[in-house]
């Protein structure tokens, strides 16, 4: 079965790229044309169910897709502007126009990329004029136009079709860097490797250890052995039906505790990329009485160990929590909640900080994940308590320990709506070598 590759690009290079993709025995190409970068997110949302992967004509539509449709989890790739595409454009200017390379203006390339290009062309000591993309297409247009009007350049070299059209309309000589067959093939090679990795990962073993509180909601008058046995049978039947849904098998570990064996790929799909609790009729009736730890491993034994770790992590979040632990010891959860975090319980890189602060590597990993999630370096105790689901006094103790060890400093105070003293605001810096 071929990989369904959605290609998002502009009209003038659409036929060229799609023909190269279609020549590959590995891919089936589904082309989608965009006229504005603002349309990219809508395109991939509408057609995500039809493709396995996405390929974009360059980094800008790729970036637009990431920003406009962050919920899309399919792998995404783009055709690079550097390498053969850039050198072909320069050759056209050298041999056709006899242009001095120092009288060109470039966009989208970093100073390092342009310096490398000059070095590979044996242009020692030549500094090329370039402007990386800063989020403004108009900024690129103005950059090229101003240099040309001042007589500092003879040609603009752009990677953006929109910029090319606008500069042409202004009378500025311009060439656009477009994909070469080699640059398209390189992108396809990256996609193929990623697909093989995904297939390997999807085939990994996934184990769910499920705990059900069979006594929840049972009155003290119905604790007869027959009634409890009937409840256990009902739980087993529900989980057997669920096991069938995930193409897995189930075994009973002890009353109220079960293990379900399936694959990572199936778990990824049913949890929406490990973000949500599965919305299955077999589980709905149990609600918050069902707690689950999911383990991913290369073997059934490893996956079961990871599932045990995941179940232990649910203790921090209460009944009804779902946590996932992968074979690299990274943790995601609780699924389906606003406070969901991705962190690691491995001591790698955090052991020294753990020894200096007296805080566990798990706690330090959670703090790192919280700061990354909130996109900040500063936090106060109430915020930390809310994110970690602990008491504010415990959060204060953690921050004080970090401060006393040199990994946090008080930078101010923040007044809340709650009566009492203002909260100390800490800047946290968990530097690792």
Image (cartoon, rainbow, N blue to C red):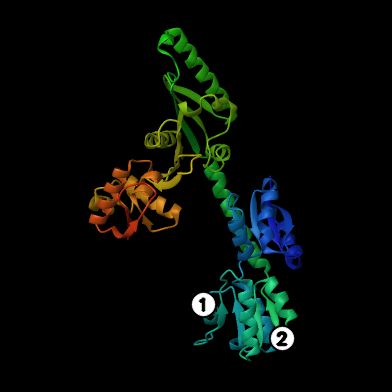
Residue 84, picture quadrant:
bottom right
Q: Which mark is residue 111?
A: 1
Please provide percent x and percent y for residue 114: 54, 78
Camera-nearest residue between 122 and 135 = 135
The residue sitting at 70% across, 58% down in the picture is 21
Please provide percent x and percent y for residue 315: 37, 34
Residue 117, picture quadrant:
bottom right
- At mark 1, the secondary structure is helix
Q: Which mark is residue 417?
A: none
In the image, residue 42 sits, relative to residue 238, either above or below, namely below
In the image, residue 319 sits, relative to residue 368, either above or below, namely above
- Which residue was labeled with disc 2? 96
Residue 257 in sight: yes
| Image quarter in which the C terminus is found | bottom left
Residue 160, picture quadrant:
bottom right
Q: What distance separates the C-alpha of mark 2 from that of mark 1?
A: 26 Å
Please state if 329 lies on the left or on the right of 20 as rendered. Answer: left
Residue 429 in sight: no
In the image, residue 256 sits, relative to residue 144, either above or below, namely above
- At mark 2, the secondary structure is helix
């Amino acid at each position: 079965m071929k990989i369904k590759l959605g290609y998002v690009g502009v009209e003038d290079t659409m036929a060229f790229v799609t023909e190269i993709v279609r020549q590959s025995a590995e891919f089936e190409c589904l082309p989608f044309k965009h006229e504005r970068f603002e349309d990219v997110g809508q395109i991939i949302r509408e057609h995500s169910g039809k493709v396995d992967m996405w390929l974009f004509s360059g980094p800008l539509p790729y970036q637009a897709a990431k920003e406009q449709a962050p919920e899309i989890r399919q792998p995404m790739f783009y055709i690079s502007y550097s390498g053969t595409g850039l050198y072909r454009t320069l050759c056209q200017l050298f041999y056709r126009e006899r242009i001095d390379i120092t009288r060109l203006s470039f966009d989208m390339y970093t100073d390092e990329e342009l310096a490398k290009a000059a070095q590979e062309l044996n242009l020692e000591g030549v500094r090329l004029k370039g402007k990386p993309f800063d989020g403004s297409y108009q900024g690129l247009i103005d950059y090229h136009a101003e240099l040309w009007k001042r007589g500092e350049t003879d040609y603009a070299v752009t990677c953006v079709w929109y910029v090319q059209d606008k500069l042409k309309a202004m009378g500025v000589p311009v060439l656009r860097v477009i994909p070469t067959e080699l640059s398209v093939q390189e992108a396809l090679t990256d996609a193929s490797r990623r697909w093989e990795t995904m297939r390997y990962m999807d085939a990994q073993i996934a184990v769910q250890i499920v705990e059900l509180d069979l006594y929840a909601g049972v009155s003290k008058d119905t604790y007869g052995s027959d009634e409890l046995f009937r409840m256990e049978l009902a739980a087993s039947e529900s989980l057997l039906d669920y096991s069938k849904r995930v193409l897995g098998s189930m075994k009973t570990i002890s009353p109220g505790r079960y293990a379900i064996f399936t694959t990572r790929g199936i778990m990824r799909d049913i949890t929406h990329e490990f973000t949500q609790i599965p919305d299955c009729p077999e589980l709905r009736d149990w609600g918050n009485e069902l707690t689950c730890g999911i383990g991913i491993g290369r073997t059934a034994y490893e996956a079961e160990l990871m599932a045990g770790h995941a179940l232990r992590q649910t203790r921090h979040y209460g009944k009804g929590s779902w946590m996932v632990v992968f074979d690299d010891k990274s943790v995601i959860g609780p699924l389906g909640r606003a406070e969901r975090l991705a962190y690691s319980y491995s001591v790698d890189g955090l052991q020294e900080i753990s020894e200096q602060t007296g805080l566990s590597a798990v706690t330090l990993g959670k703090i790192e994940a919280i700061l990354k999630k909130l996109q900040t370096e500063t936090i106060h105790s109430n915020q930390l308590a809310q994110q970690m689901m602990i008491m504010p006094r415990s959060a204060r103790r953690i921050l004080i320990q970090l401060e006393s060890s040199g990994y946090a400093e008080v930078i101010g105070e923040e007044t809340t709506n709650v009566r009492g003293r203002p909260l100390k605001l800490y800047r946290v810096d968990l530097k690792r070598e």
